[in-house]
Image: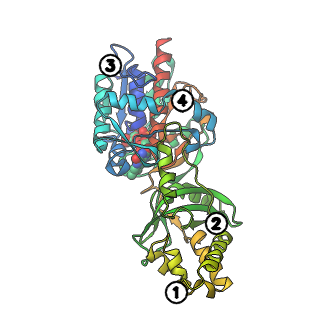
């Protein structure tokens, strides 16, 4: 074997998690986000199948990259091991991320729901900062050739073989299987299974929902609470936020946030439906705006999605309104909150005076506005999903190092693991935290022999 092919650490995948892992493996990154170009060992090679990796960073957040959130907790994620997740998030938190990027010339701005974006609004600045830091840290790169084989070899041969190179430790940061043209094809899942790991089944997450294709509503945006229910009406997942009716179904943050629950329930044969409450958050007194802004207050907990209003409660509101103004039309009353197009499309009794409404008209109106069955039949799938839910279970990795319990010397980080954030910068935060933990673990293990 050529001496040049021997490395201390090989990081496979140069996305957000792999870039951070490589910096930490070199010893250039402190837990508080301080970056100092290291002087010497270990020798770290970062490999990626793409000529120009980091494409997910470039397309993220509509080209603006929602780098993290002002407040992050394990409750913002879905995983089978929330306690392990919590401890890893603590190792490199949102403050450390801000310190790192600000120190590299990328200051942030906080937007609704506590989302942090680069002040320049350019995702390219985030990627450039990472690539430059990797260069300054002395991380060697080899891009444009996908890795085909990772296998364990004798310790005196290196410990791990990665195609034609060997290394004492390997970090797998190959991402999930969403938007595969960015290079993330699910390689890490197959590797994990070949090594004997189980996998939490993977499903697309953060994808638009298809099915409710009503041209009369396409283009309407309004705040909504979406609830995924099973055939018995049991709540399988819920989110609140802005929703957009499209020509194919529904999109917007709230639709994306329930996609994984819908996919998971479909895969389990539970015949899920997605119900929309268009009424609760849509008042003009600013309740929704307050809901969005809540997360900006330092120390405030991120808002959890409220429960949808029960149709019978809206029926009662309509009855009360009828008592106060019997001659007013239902549509006029509803227009205080809802766009005209929504009322025209969903409320056939809109032109009826409040006092003249029948019980069944009140019931139908209340059901359409608080428990509207969106007729969802699918999500846009892996082709468009922002992330992949499921993956390598954290329980099969060492808690402090993300090293495989089955394959010592091999670490996993980023989206390949069974951790899925909701919309708002949480998926990148997981990539930074887990990349840091895996990289630091390699650095420390090599330093101690
Ligand atoms: C459209 C879109 C918008 C998004 N917006 C946001 C956002 O604003 N905020 C947020 O928090 N999250 C966002 N996400 C999610 C976020 O991009 C991912 O969670 C994050 O990029 C995962 O990082 P990763 O490093 O684990 O994986 P990836 O970024 O997927 O990187 C994996 C890398 O591994 C390489 N690779 C794979 N297999 C091999 C192999 N066999 N050999 C060599 N290299 C290999 C790939 O080429 C790739 O470069 C968005 C995702 C998408 C698709």
Q: Secondary structure at mark 3?
A: loop
Name the residue beneath numbered marker 2: 271
**Please, is residue 363 above or below residue 70 in the view?**
below
Disc 3 and disc 1: Cα gap in Å?
70 Å
Q: Earlier in the sequence, mark 1 or mark 4?
A: 4
How far from the left and from the top, in percent, is residue 16?
A: 40, 37
How many numbered callouts?
Answer: 4
If the picture is divided into quarters, which one holds ligand 1? Answer: top left
Q: CA distance from mark 3 to mark 4?
A: 24 Å
Please state if 384 lies on the left or on the right of 326 as rendered. left
Judging by the rendered image, the residue that carries numbered circle 3 is 37
**Label 2 vs label 3, nearer the camera:** 3
Label 2 with label 3: CB-CB less than 8 Å: no
| Residue 264 seen in this snapshot | no
Task: Name the residue that disc number 1 marks.
Answer: 351
Quick one: 125 or 220, which is closer to the camera? 220
Q: Quadrant of residue 358?
A: bottom right
Lower sequence index among marks 1 and 2:
2
Q: In this orientation, which residue lies closer to the viewer: 365 or 440?
A: 365
Q: Which residue is mark 4?
A: 90
10 Å crowding of disc 2: few (<14), some (14-19), many (20+): some
Query: Mark 3: few, some, or many residues within 10 Å (few <14, many ≥20)?
Result: some
> Are the two marked residues, 4 and 2, in contact with CB atoms closer than 8 angstroms?
no
Q: Estimate the spatial distance between the alpha carbons at disc 1 and disc 2, rounded to whole Å.
A: 36 Å
For label 4, count other residues whose C-alpha is less than 10 Å away and answer few (under 14), some (14-19) or many (20+): some
At a point 33% along the width and 13% down the height, the residue shown is 39
Position of residue 21 relative to residue 242, above or below, is above
Q: Is residue 86 left or right of residue 124?
A: right
Neighbourhood count class around disc 1 (C-alpha, 10 Å): few under 14, some 14–19, many 20 upward: some
């Amino acid at each position: 074997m050529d001496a040049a092919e021997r490395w201390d650490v090989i990081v496979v995948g140069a996305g957000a998690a792999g870039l951070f892992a490589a910096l930490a493996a070199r010893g250039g990154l402190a837990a508080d986000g301080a970056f100092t170009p290291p002087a010497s060992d270990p020798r770290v090679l970062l490999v990626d199948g793409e000529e120009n990796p980091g494409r997910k960073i470039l397309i993220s957040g509509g080209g603006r990259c929602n780098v993290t959130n002002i407040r992050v907790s394990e409750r913002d994620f879905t995983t089978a091991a929330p306690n392990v997740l919590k401890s890893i998030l603590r190792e490199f938190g949102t403050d450390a991320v801000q310190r790192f990027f600000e120190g590299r010339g990328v200051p942030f701005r906080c937007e609704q729901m506590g989302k942090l974006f680069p002040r320049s609004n350019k995702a390219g600045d985030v990627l450039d900062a990472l690539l430059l830091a990797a260069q300054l840290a002395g991380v060697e790169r080899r891009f444009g050739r996908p890795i085909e084989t990772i296998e364990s070899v004798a310790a005196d041969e290196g410990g791990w073989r990665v195609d034609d190179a060997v290394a004492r430790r390997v970090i797998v940061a190959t991402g999930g299987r969403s938007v595969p043209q960015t290079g993330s094809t699910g390689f890490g899942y197959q590797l994990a299974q070949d090594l004997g790991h189980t996998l939490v089944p993977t499903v697309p997450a953060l994808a638009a929902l298809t099915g409710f294709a009503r041209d009369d509503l396409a283009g309407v945006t309004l705040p909504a609470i979406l609830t995924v229910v099973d055939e018995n009406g049991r709540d399988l997942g819920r989110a609140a936020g802005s929703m957009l009716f499209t020509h194919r179904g529904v999109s917007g943050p709230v639709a994306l946030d329930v996609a994984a629950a819908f996919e998971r329930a479909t895969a389990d044969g539970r015949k899920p439906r997605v119900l929309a409450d268009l009424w609760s958050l849509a008042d003009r007194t600013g309740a929704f705006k307050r809901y969005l802004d809540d997360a900006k207050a330092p120390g405030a907990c991120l808002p959890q999605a409220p429960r949808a209003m029960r149709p019978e409660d809206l029926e009662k509101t309509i009855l009360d309104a009828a008592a106060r103004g019997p001659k007013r039309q239902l549509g006029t009353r509803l227009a205080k909150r809802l766009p005209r197009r929504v009322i025209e499309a969903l409320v056939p009794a809109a032109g009826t005076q409040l006092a003249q409404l029948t019980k069944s008209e009140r019931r139908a109106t209340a059901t359409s506005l608080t428990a509207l069955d969106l007729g969802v039949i699918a999500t846009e799938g892996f082709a468009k999903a922002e992330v992949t839910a499921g993956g390598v279970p954290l329980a099969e990795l060492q808690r402090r190092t993300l090293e495989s319990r089955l394959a010592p010397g091999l670490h996993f980080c980023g989206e390949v693991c069974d951790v899925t954030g909701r919309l708002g910068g949480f998926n990148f935060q997981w990539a930074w935290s887990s990349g840091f933990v895996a990289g630091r673990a390699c650095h420390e293990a090599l330093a101690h022999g």
